[in-house]
Amino acid sequence: MTFDKKHRPQVLSDVVFASSDVQQTLEDYANNKRDKHLLLYGPKGTGKSVSAELIMRERLGSIWQAGLAEPFNAKAYAAQHDSFGPILSQWNWQLSAGALAGCSIVDEIDQFTLPMQHKLRAFIDQYEMGVVIATTNNLHLVDGPLKDRFRPVFVDYPSVAQWVLRVVAVMTAEGIPITSSQAQVLLSGFEGSGRTLNDWIEDYVLRLQGAVHKLTNPAASGVTPAQILTIHNTTEGK
Ligand SMILES: Nc1ncnc2c1ncn2[C@@H]1O[C@H](COP(=O)(O)OP(=O)(O)O)[C@@H](O)[C@H]1O
Ligand SMILES: [Mg+2]
């Protein structure tokens, strides 16, 4: 399993958001408190797709199962379908399994051609038993009237300080317990997306594990925080 997959957020509260308002809005969606179609937009690697999946999973609750909740990618979808029948049928399956409302994900909605965007608008005007959660890195490519059917939510990169707890959680899961202040030191100078962050943590974990291996002290089975910082200092500038 890839590092990214292993540490993929499992619940919406694992996702780090730059804005607490955005976090609250998305939690409201996850708790079925909001029913307007949702459009997550912002730069790539801010957690839009993973948030969409977790919102859907939490909305469907106990009836969630992979077969009932496959996210659609607009480009792949349009290569196979020219109508929204498959989304309608996903909603019907979910409703027959006991869902209160249907829920479908359209990732990278901007990849639909304009005629397909028009069809989607007509579709969601006609059928009201489901919610579409769409994502895009290119809001300007989403047709205005379609956009109006959605609640647009801007998902931005979290700050370094906001990433700290996530880094602590991932490092701890990798058997490298560190404190928040140590994570803050490690993160100094980090700029980038959640996807980059995963690559960056993976690099660190591998370097630290390699360094620990080389420690001559046979008692050094686990890594202590003090060792982390020593190793950090000696591997800085890799
Ligand atoms: N805000 C975040 N909080 C936690 N993990 C994140 C976040 N953003 C990205 N990631 C990690 O990066 C991976 C890719 O994120 P993704 O949701 O595909 O980004 P986007 O759709 O915005 O381009 C996720 O599976 C997750 O592991
Ligand atoms: Mg995405």
Image: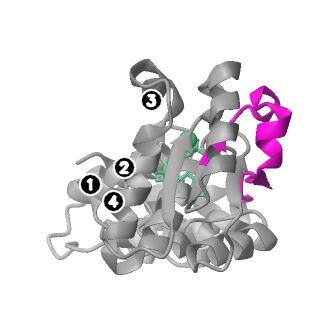
Dot 2 alpha-carbon crowd within 10 angstroms: few under 14, some 14 to 19, many 20 or more: some
Q: Is mark 4 within 8 Å of ligand 2?
A: no
Q: Secondary structure at mark 1?
A: helix
Please tell me whether residue 59 is drawn above or below residue 232 in the rendered image.
below
Q: Which residue is mark 4?
A: 93
Q: Amino acid at mark 3?
A: Tyr
Q: Earlier in the sequence, mark 4 or mark 1?
A: 1
Q: Amino acid at mark 1?
A: Gly
Horizontal side of residue 17 vs 31, given as left or right: right
Is disc 2 in contact with disc 3, using a CB cutoff of under 8 Å?
A: no
Q: Earlier in the sequence, mark 3 or mark 4?
A: 3
Q: Nearer the viewer, residue 197 or 122?
A: 122
Q: Position of residue 230 (x, y in %)?
A: 47, 63
Q: Which residue is mark 3?
A: 77
Spatial distance from mark 4 to mark 1, Cα to Cα?
A: 9 Å
From where the camera sits, is residue 189 visible?
Answer: no
Return the mark for residue 70. 2
Q: Secondary structure at mark 4?
A: helix
Q: Earlier in the sequence, mark 2 or mark 3?
A: 2
Q: Which residue is mark 1?
A: 67
